[in-house]
Image (spheres, helix red, strand yellow):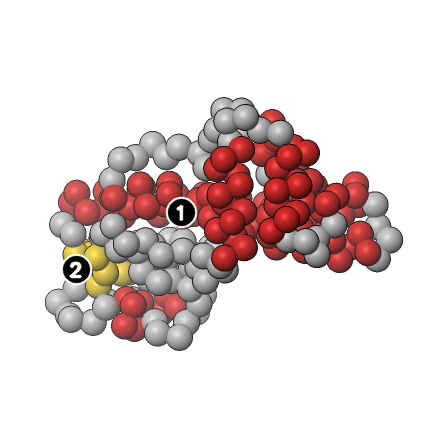
Amino acid sequence: MSAPVSSVASSIPVKAIAGVLTRMSKTYNPTATTAAIGLILPARDPRAIRAALALTDHDKTAKRGTRHNPRLKGTGDAARAVQSDEINYRAAYIEKASQRMTDSLKSGKTVREVMREERTYYKAHELARANRQASALKVDAATAAFGGLLGWRSRDDGKVSPECKAAHGANFSATSRPRIGWPGSVHPHCRCLPGPAWATKRTVDGSTIGMKVA
């Protein structure tokens, strides 16, 4: 199954961080994990890396091996794809968060202060993850009902985003996540849904070229 993650989440540093998180998931050592990520991101303040790991609660729950990549209650293609992607999104968050907190530490703020500021970004990260997972389950349910070719349905009102508006009325394969994401996961308040295929050859990817990648 083809399920691309964003250009950020598939960058070389992010892939390397994801590898560290995967290797450390069963025998987590915060000092060793911070040092390993520090080799990948040498310009980051080690305190910022450690704080990013602490915010994601990796050090408490990596012993269970699932906090950074929790198991979905679904076994369809979309659910499995999201499951495999999440470690990359978590790594991308750690990469960005450690940069933000490094910058704040350089300004003279304490670790406690920068962590408090970062929690807003972390909440957004968790919301995006929940949206991806919920959307994947809806795609799997739609696949069971309508088959492997699905139609994208957005809301026809003033709140719809450009990406969702462009995708409306186009089709996508249930075995290949669209570039902008599954319906319902394009942005934090996405209201799009998968449904039966439209009577058209227009595809979601073809209709959203050059737009935001999930």
The amino acid type of the residue labelled 1 equals Asp
Q: Position of residue 107 (x, y in %)?
A: 84, 57
Between circles 1 and 2, the one closer to the viewer is 1
Provide the residue designation for mark 2: 197
Q: Is residue 42 above or below residue 59?
A: below
Query: As drawn, is 162 to the left or to the right of 147?
Result: right
- Taking the view exactly as shown, the residue that stands out farthest to the front is 39
Tell me the SS state at disc 1: helix
Amino acid type of the residue tagged 2 in the rendering:
Ala
Which label sits on residue 206? none
CA separation in Å, label 1 and label 2: 26 Å
Question: Which one is earlier in the sequence, the residue at label 1 or at label 2?
Answer: 1
Residue 147 placement, left or right of 205: left
**Percent position (x, y) of residue 32?**
64, 35
Circle 1 residues within 10 Å: few <14, some 14–19, many ≥20: some
Counting from the top left corner in percent of width and height, residue 43 is at 70, 56
* Residue 112 vertical placement versus 194 (above, below): above
Towards the viewer: 13 or 74 = 13
Q: Residue at x 32, y 46 (%)?
A: 81
Rendered view: 101 above or below 76: below
Q: Is residue 134 visible?
A: no
Q: Residue at x 53, y 41 (%)?
A: 20
Of helix, strand and loop, which one carries label 2?
A: loop
Residue furthest right as drawn: 108
Pointer 1: what residue? 85
- Where does residue 2 sit, x and y in percent of width and height? 28, 54
Is there CB contact under 8 Å for labels 1 and 2?
no
Tally the marks. 2
